[in-house]
Amino acid sequence: MGLFSKKQKDKSARQQETKESTSKMDALVRPGGVFMMQLLMKERCEMPPVERMTDVLSEHLGRIEAVGSAAVSAGFAARDYEVQFQDGKVPVQLMISECDEFQADRIDDMKRSQMWDCREERDRILSECKYHVLAHDMLGGGLPSRVRANMLMDYLEALMELYPSCEAVYFLNSGKLILADEIRAKEVAGLKRFIRFAVNVRFFNVMGTEDSVVDTLGLSLLYIEDIQYHFHDMDPNWVVNHAYNMASYLLENDAPMKNGDTIDGMAEGRIVQNIQWKCHFEDALIAPERAVLDVCMGEFAAGGRYD
């Protein structure tokens, strides 16, 4: 099938299969897991009053109810985002911590090397920002993928309004670092926000070879398999562009793939329909351990990939 054709599959069955096979997976990439982000800032800040937080969250997310607050955190029920359980529906919870010290040394060299979106300012941000506010959802994994993605990005935009001193946002699930002003600019809309801000497309050279690997982190939280390319003799920037386009297509069209499906390939940096690349599910080549949708790039495929 082409990249812009939709492939249907029972989604509830797919999610159940994924849950059963990933019970021991790294919590940061586990399908349906908790979405976490750190708001980084130079100076310690006070948590806004609960009434103020409720008002701003309501402007972005609809019906919001404060469900508990303490000196160290505040919680809110998103009444327009409910998850069905056997005993009834329960609203997704949105949690915000107090401002605390940010420990930049917990971000290792590998993660730092993949912060492509603000590479020139990465070291300055991580050294100057001494404090952070942690924000995350609870029960969000029970929402449909597109609904959750939009909810999380509305939540992010509300946080940018609540915390004007925020310099950058670090997305723990994908290792992506984004300048807060880019989020505040609101130049990206809809589901594309999740791909732009929360999904990280990484690039690695394979030591001792002329091969490269491009993969994604961040899609798995939405029950969409991350994508992987193992290749040679193609401009990595083209492959990165292909990965972002494919990630956007899979999310926007709710289009799960199956082993052996094909997608539109590339020629001279452009996605074209007359070149088809075959896809299979494999274990990721690069940590963290997870299942990925591996794209075999035809004559550019490396590592003895399948035809």
Image: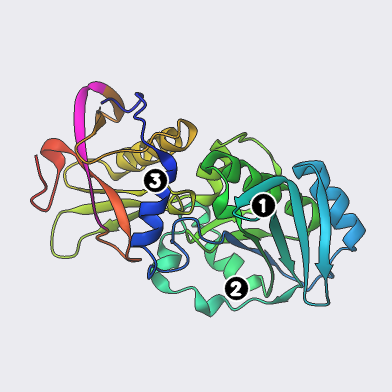
Regarding mark 2 in the picture, which secondary structure is present there? Answer: helix
Residue 160 appearing in the image:
yes
Q: Is residue 182 visible?
A: no
Magenta-colored span: 273-283
Q: Quadrant of the N terminus?
A: top left
User: Against 29, is 237 above or below?
Assistant: above
Give the residue displayed 41% in from the left and 36% down from the top. 250
Label 1, label 3: how many angstroms apart (C-alpha)? 20 Å
Label 2 Cα crowd, 10 Å radius (few <14 / some 14-19 / many 20+): few
Q: For mark 1, what is the residue?
A: 88
Q: Position of residue 183 (x, y in %)?
A: 66, 46
- Kindly report the distance in space between the C-alpha atoms of the residues bearing marks 2 and 1: 46 Å
Please name the amino acid that badge 2 sits on.
Ser
Q: Which residue corresponds to mark 2?
A: 127
Ranked by sequence position, the earlier of labels 3 and 2 is 3
Mark sitting earlier along the chain (2/1): 1
The foreground one among 82 and 229 is 82
What residue is drawn where x is 83% and y is 54%?
A: 65
Asked if residue 37 is among those painted magenta in the image, a careful observer would answer no
Residue 67 placement: quadrant: bottom right
In primary-sequence order, the first of circles 1 and 3 is 3
Residue 280 percent across, percent down from the top left? 21, 44
Label 3 residue SS: helix
User: Would you say 249 lies left or right of 144 here?
Assistant: left
Residue 233: give x, y in percent of width and height: 16, 43
The answer to whether residue 214 is left or right of residue 218 is left
